[in-house]
Every structure is written in structure tokens, then in C-alpha cells.
């Protein structure tokens, strides 16, 4: 007879892990793939904008994004979630493939490329913040999650969002108004 478990009873997989634990592992590895792509994207933006106001403004953001990826790895380790290398590689490769988009210029970089990169980075930081919020809520019932650390990560994500958005607006106005 195929019956559903009682509410509040976690289903166990053949490996003995609950479905929730398995899904948390998938969730965190998906965020790790995104964090890998975001770290690469931010570092590239800083390299291409070096010696400019944009590069100087984004350098600390890129460093924070890299630190956040390391924090995610620490959290995964604390929770006993194994890293799925294929997802990390997919995040890395996806970021590289994203560079191939047409941008209106054949030989030199396009200002539109910077705008799109900033928009992608903004979306990535928003996704990261959502992940930290989810973990923060789970921390109410899982003592392995340091809620204070997650609060710090959430605040850093908010600051990153503000900086990225400020520069996204500036770059979009410059690129799309015809003055760039």
C-alpha cells in the first residue's frame, strides 16, 4: 500500500538522508554555482574597469562577493553538504558563455556590455540575499546555522546591491542616452 507519511514526518531516501536534507544540498549547491559565476563576473568587471571610478567602486564589492562564496562553502561544510563539482563547473562555464553575447561592437568592448554585466551581478546578489534569508529562517531550528553570521552576510549583500545599483543606473544612462 502506498501511503503518504504523516505531516511532520520526513521521508527517508534509500541512503537514509531525509528528503529535506537532500533538497537543502541541491539548493546550496545551486547557490554555489551562482556564487561561482558571480565571483567570476565581478572580478572581470573590476579588471575591465581598472583605473576608473567604476573599477574602484566595484573592487570592494568583488572582494565581498568572493568572501561570500567562501562563507557559503563554510556553511555547507558545517551542514555536512558535499560540494557538487559539476555544478561549480557549470556556474563557471555559464559565466564564460555569457560573455559571448552580442553587444553592438565587434572589436572593442561595448558600454552596453558593462550595463548588462552590472544587471546580471545585481540579480546574482539579490539571489544570494534570498539564499541568506532562507538559511537565516532555517537557523531558527538548526543550531549549525549561525544566525548572527547570516545577519552579517545579509547586510553585506544589501550594501553590495546599493553599490551595484548606483553604478548600473550611471552606466545605463551614459550608454543609452547617446552621451557614452
Image (cartoon, helix red, strand yellow):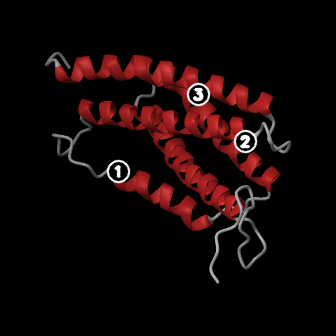
Q: Residue at x 24, y 18 (%)?
A: 174
Question: Which secondary structure, mark 3?
Answer: helix
| Picture disc at residue 98 | 1
Q: Nearer the viewer, mark 2 or mark 3?
A: 2
Q: Nearer the viewer, mark 1 or mark 2?
A: 2
Q: Residue at x 24, y 35 (%)?
A: 110
Q: What residue would you read off at disc 3?
A: 157
Residue 154 visible, this angle: yes
Q: What residue would you read off at disc 2?
A: 138
Q: Residues within 10 Å of mark 3 (few under 14, many from 20)?
A: many
Q: Residue at x 63, y 52 (%)?
A: 28
Q: Which is more N-terminal, label 2 or label 1?
A: 1
Image position of 180 with respect to 12: above or below: above
Question: Which secondary structure, mark 2?
Answer: helix
Image position of 132 with respect to 86: above or below: above
Task: Determine the CA span between mark 2 and mark 3.
Answer: 18 Å
Q: Which is more N-terminal, label 3 or label 1?
A: 1
Q: Position of residue 88 (x, y in %)?
A: 57, 59
Q: Are marks 2 and 3 in contact (CB under 8 Å)?
A: no
Task: Determine the CA span between mark 1 and mark 3.
Answer: 23 Å
User: 68 or 4: nearer the eye?
Assistant: 4
User: 11 or 40: nearer the eye?
Assistant: 11
Q: Residues within 10 Å of mark 2 (few under 14, many from 20)?
A: some
Q: Which is more N-terminal, label 3 or label 2?
A: 2
Q: Residue at x 43, y 17 (%)?
A: 53
Horizontal relation, residue 37 to residue 64: left or right:
left
Amino acid at each position: 500500500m502506498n501511503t503518504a507519511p504523516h505531516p511532520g514526518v520526513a521521508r527517508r531516501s534509500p541512503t537514509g538522508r531525509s528528503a529535506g536534507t537532500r533538497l537543502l544540498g541541491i539548493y546550496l549547491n545551486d547557490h554555489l554555482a551562482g556564487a561561482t559565476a558571480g565571483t567570476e563576473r565581478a572580478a572581470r568587471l573590476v579588471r575591465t574597469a581598472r583605473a576608473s571610478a567604476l573599477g574602484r567602486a566595484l573592487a570592494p564589492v568583488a572582494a565581498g562577493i568572493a568572501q561570500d562564496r567562501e562563507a557559503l562553502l563554510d556553511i555547507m561544510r558545517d551542514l555536512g553538504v558535499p560540494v557538487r563539482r559539476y555544478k561549480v563547473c557549470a556556474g563557471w562555464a555559464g559565466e564564460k558563455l555569457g560573455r559571448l553575447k552580442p553587444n553592438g561592437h565587434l572589436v572593442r568592448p561595448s558600454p552596453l556590455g558593462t550595463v548588462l554585466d552590472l544587471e546580471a551581478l545585481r540579480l546574482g546578489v539579490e539571489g544570494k540575499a534570498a539564499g541568506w534569508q532562507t538559511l537565516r529562517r532555517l537557523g531558527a531550528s538548526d543550531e549549525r546555522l549561525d544566525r548572527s553570521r547570516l545577519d552579517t552576510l545579509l547586510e553585506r549583500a544589501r550594501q553590495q546591491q546599493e553599490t551595484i545599483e548606483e553604478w548600473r543606473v550611471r552606466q545605463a544612462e551614459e550608454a543609452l542616452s547617446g552621451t557614452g
